[in-house]
Image (spheres, grey):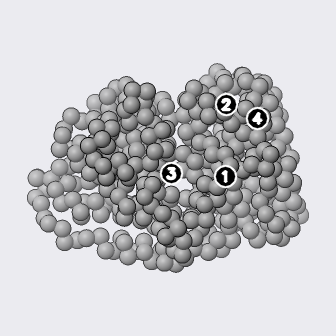
């Protein structure tokens, strides 16, 4: 995958050309709002996101957006919960897809979050920039909405084209049987074992398991959709048999679990030590330019393909009771959904914009890897939610699944015992 240099040049120009001549407003007259976000790193996307946040101040001289950068969405949620505990309500938090139903219900039940529906109803432009997937995923039963995401979460896996060709593999596997055979060929590439098919981080394995579950029965797709709303029935035949078959797949494919976080798996992929990388379309900006990588969907059943497509929890506005602050926060949220900012999210940070008015095809020359990955994800026959959303009613069980999966794959506990333990979370 060779990224077009124009995307990087555009990122640099954008950061250098943030308007510096906006009308000056005395600090004492500005509405002060604070944003907790997880873009604290030094990668291109992190730097660009902070630049986008900063440009809001330049465009809105009567508002001062103060940013608190934390190391990821989980850290944002932890910090927000600390503030809630002492009676402070953050003006804006951006979880970047982290958090599930427990956190969402917590902020709603305690009245910490601002209901966005009244603002959407009163503003046609705001409504037109909003993804229906976002509303479908997070609207409450009584029609309220407390979170909006500026990007969509689409995932499958990336593969090293050169290693595939070296192993005599012409295309991504179309079935799970072919997936296992493909992995076996990749594992035999180096006699010293320096290259393996997939060295995954534990955080990404629920996505692989969910995609695998869809192929287990004719009813699996329907059941998986139901579990997203009700929580998993870990005692069901689908789950117990699915766990046993998943262990067989992982063992036969020689899949290794190394590290907890995406950066661990990314390092292995970028160094050529692994041929597959579980991850989202947004991973394109993190993959080394030295790696000839392409995106693929998961196998399904009966020739079908599977990808994960979701709108996660992201921006949550504080229900502060201060109308000036709340209006300033709404202005920020509309800014993040605005066409030109959404275009920057795609071109500079490699993420899929949530605004339905954005056509990525217009940027095929500048961000070909993202455009092609999104096309492939969208073309899948079956769309399931990402594990962060799919398991949102079973967050403790998901954590247990990730932490204890290596023990299960080693055979130290049976599928029934593992499902029992998951049920107890």
Sequence-wise first label, 1 or 2: 2
The quadrant of the rendering that contains the N terminus is: bottom right
394 sits left or right of 93 in the view: right
Judged by depth in the image, the label closer to the viewer, 2 or 4, is 4
Residue pointed to by mark 2: 223
> Where in the figure is residue 64, as x and y percent of width and height?
22, 54
Name the element at disc 4: loop
- Badge 3: residue crowd in 10 Å (few <14, some 14–19, many ≥20): many
Mark 4 = which residue? 218
Q: Is residue 65 left or right of residue 37?
A: left
Label 2 sits on a secondary structure element that is: helix
Of the residues under marks 3 and 2, which one precedes in the sequence? 3
Task: Answer left or right for 123 relative to 343.
Answer: left
> What x and y, as percent, mark residue 276?
72, 58
Which of the marked residues, 3 or 1, is nearer the chain's N terminus?
A: 3
Label placed on residue 380: 1
Q: Is residue 360 visible?
A: yes
Residue, x 54% and y 34% (percent of image)? Answer: 392
Q: Nearer the viewer, residue 139 or 410?
A: 139
In the image, 178 versus 33, the foreground residue is 178
For the residues marked 2 and 4, what is the alpha-carbon distance in whole angstroms?
10 Å
Residue placed under numbered mark 3 in the picture: 152
Residue at 83% x, 57% y: name it. Answer: 182
């Amino acid at each position: 995958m060779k990224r077009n240099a124009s995307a990087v040049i555009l990122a640099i120009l954008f950061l250098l050309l943030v308007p510096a001549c906006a009308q000056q407003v005395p600090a004492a007259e500005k509405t002060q709002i604070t944003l907790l976000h997880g873009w604290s790193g030094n990668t291109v996307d992190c730097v660009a996101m902070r630049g986008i946040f900063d440009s809001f101040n330049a465009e809105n001289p009567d508002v001062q957006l103060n940013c608190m950068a934390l190391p990821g969405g989980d850290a944002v949620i932890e910090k927000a919960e600390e503030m809630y505990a002492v009676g402070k309500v953050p003006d804006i938090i951006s979880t970047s897809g982290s958090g599930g139903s427990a956190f969402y219900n917590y902020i709603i039940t305690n009245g910490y979050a601002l209901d966005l529906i009244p603002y959407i109803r009163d503003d046609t432009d705001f409504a037109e920039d909003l993804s229906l997937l976002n509303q479908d995923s997070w609207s409450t039963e009584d029609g309220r909405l407390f979170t909006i995401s500026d990007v969509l979460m689409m995932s499958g896996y990336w593969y090293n084209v050169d290693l595939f060709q070296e192993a005599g593999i012409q295309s991504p596997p179309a079935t799970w049987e072919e997936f296992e055979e493909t992995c076996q060929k990749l594992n035999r590439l180096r006699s010293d074992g320096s290259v393996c098919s997939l060295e995954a981080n534990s955080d990404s394995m629920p996505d692989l398991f969910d995609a695998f579950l869809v192929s287990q029965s004719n009813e699996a797709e329907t059941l998986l959709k139901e579990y997203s709303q009700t929580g998993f029935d870990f005692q069901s035949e689908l789950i117990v048999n699915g766990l046993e078959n998943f262990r067989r797949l992982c063992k036969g494919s020689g899949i290794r679990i190394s590290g907890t976080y995406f950066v661990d798996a990314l390092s292995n992929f970028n160094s050529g030590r692994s041929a597959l990388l579980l991850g989202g379309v947004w991973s394109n900006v993190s993959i080394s330019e030295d790696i000839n990588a392409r995106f693929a969907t998961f196998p399904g059943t009966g020739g079908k393909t599977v990808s994960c497509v979701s709108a996660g929890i992201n921006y949550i506005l504080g229900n502060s009771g201060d109308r000036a602050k709340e209006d300033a926060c709404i202005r920020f949220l509309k800014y993040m959904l605005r066409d030109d900012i959404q275009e920057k999210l795609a071109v500079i940070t490699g993420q899929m914009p949530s605004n339905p008015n954005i056509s990525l095809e217009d940027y095929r020359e500048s961000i070909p890897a993202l455009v092609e990955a999104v096309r492939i994800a969208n073309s899948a026959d079956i769309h399931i939610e990402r594990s962060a959303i799919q398991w949102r009613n079973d967050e403790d069980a998901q954590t247990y699944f990730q932490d204890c999966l290596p023990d299960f794959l080693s055979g130290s506990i049976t599928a029934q015992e593992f499902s029992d333990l998951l049920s107890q979370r």
